[in-house]
Image (cartoon, grey):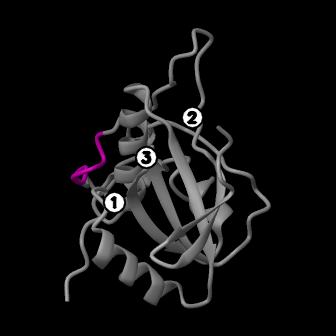
Amino acid sequence: MPMKSTQEILGYPFKFVCFIDPERDQNGNVSEFNPQDRYNNKRNLSLHKYGRGPFCQFRIPKNLLYEGVYALKEGQVIIYIGMCQNLSDRFNARGYGTISPRNCFDGGQHTNCKINNSILKSIKKGRKIELWFYPTHDRHLVESRLILRLQPSWNSQLKW
């Protein structure tokens, strides 16, 4: 059965972008990384809650320079909702796809580490992660509505 390229999520038309496909070794196993080991920790910072890893590396198409809201799905279940100013940047070198050593420590990007590690765990269990996207300038409002209504398991729920 072919995959639908558009899917309504609470009335918003999301478009399928790609499957998240991490780098693999010659045996087909997902390659794991621990970038925190490369950080020159002169200030003696502690690893934050999600900084221990391990992490994977992946990329999505680099021409997706859109502002909007994205959804990660595992099968038919929406597991994460987020927003961005530039989808390719959010998922590639400055985002989830490559964890910077500094982001593993206090003051770093907790969310990048959390989502990357969650993707790694799911894919190692044989699950497929899909990326869906809805372009909008109202990304803050749409993201809030979707998280509040859907309560995806990988989101830290918004506090009002």
Q: Residues within 10 Å of mark 1 (few under 14, many from 20)?
A: some
Q: Is residue 94 above or below residue 101?
A: below
The residue at which mark 1 appears reads as 110
Q: Label 3, label 2: how many angstroms apart (C-alpha)?
A: 10 Å
The residue at which mark 2 appears reads as 22
Q: Label 3, label 1: how many angstroms apart (C-alpha)?
A: 10 Å
Q: Is residue 65 above or below residue 20?
A: below
Q: Which residue: 49% across, 62% down? A: 71
The residue at which mark 3 appears reads as 116
Q: Label 1, label 2: how many angstroms apart (C-alpha)?
A: 20 Å
Give residue 145's position: percent from left, percent from top: 37, 83
Look at label 3 and name its amino acid: Asn
Give residue 101's position: percent from left, percent from top: 44, 47
Q: Is 139 or 11 nearer to us in this picture?
A: 11
Give the mark, 1 or 2, whose residue is nearer the N terminus: 2
Q: Residues within 10 Å of mark 3 (few under 14, many from 20)?
A: many
Asked which secondary structure carries label 2, the reply is loop
Query: Is residue 45 left or right of 37 when viewed as pictured?
Result: left
Cβ atoms under marks 1 and 2 closer than 8 Å: no
The label shown at residue 127 is none
Q: Which residues are magenta?
A: 46-52
Give residue 59's position: percent from left, percent from top: 65, 46
Query: Is residue 28 left or right of 143 when viewed as pictured?
Result: right
